[in-house]
Amino acid sequence: MKLLINGYTVTEHITLKRDKNFINYIDKSIGHIKRNKKKYITLVLSIALTVDLSTLTVFAVDSSAIDKAGMEILSLIRRVGYWVGIILCSKDVIKHCMRGHLDSIGSIVAMYGMGFGVLYFLPWLFDLIKGLF
């Protein structure tokens, strides 16, 4: 037995009501944009000009400064990754030892080792690709 509201089941009626509310919201938003067209054009133009100006400053910067800053950040990430990897790996190894899952210790150490190794492997790979082209 189904309960009908205006020829629709209850779930269909709720879906149609929600869809009508969404369409009304879209119509209201479009009407607001039409009424305030000049303000929206000013907003879009100011955002476009700001984005364009920010890209000009990036191209004007000396690339050696960017490389130096990037290497400093990468060095910091490697140091943090080193200690976070050691601490989390130790925690997981101890947790698995206490549960008696001694066979999974190797996979845990390999997982954290590969995670830390990626921090050194990716820059080397990118430098290798850059040298090829």
Image (cartoon, grey):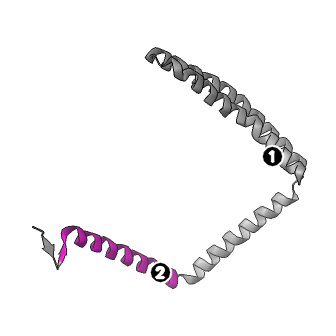
Residue segment shown in magenta: 8-36
Q: Could you tell me which quadrant the N terminus lies in?
A: bottom left
120 up-or-down from 131: above or below:
above
Q: Residues within 10 Å of mark 1 (few under 14, many from 20)?
A: few
Q: Is residue 34 left or right of residue 60?
A: left
The image position of residue 84, as x and y in percent, is 63, 27
Q: Quadrant of residue 121?
A: top right
Picture disc at residue 21: none
Read off the residue under disc 1: 126
Q: Where's the C terminus, which quadrant?
A: bottom right
Specify which label sits upstream in the sequence, 2 or 1.
2
Q: Relative to 76, is 32 above or below?
A: below
Toward the left, the furthest residue is 1
Please state which of residues 1 and 69 is positioned toward the viewer in this rendering.
Answer: 1
Q: Going 64% across and 74% down the picture, which residue do you hit?
A: 44
Q: Are marks 2 and 1 in contact (CB under 8 Å)?
A: no
Residue plotted at (81% across, 58% down): 58
Q: Is residue 17 left or right of residue 133?
A: left
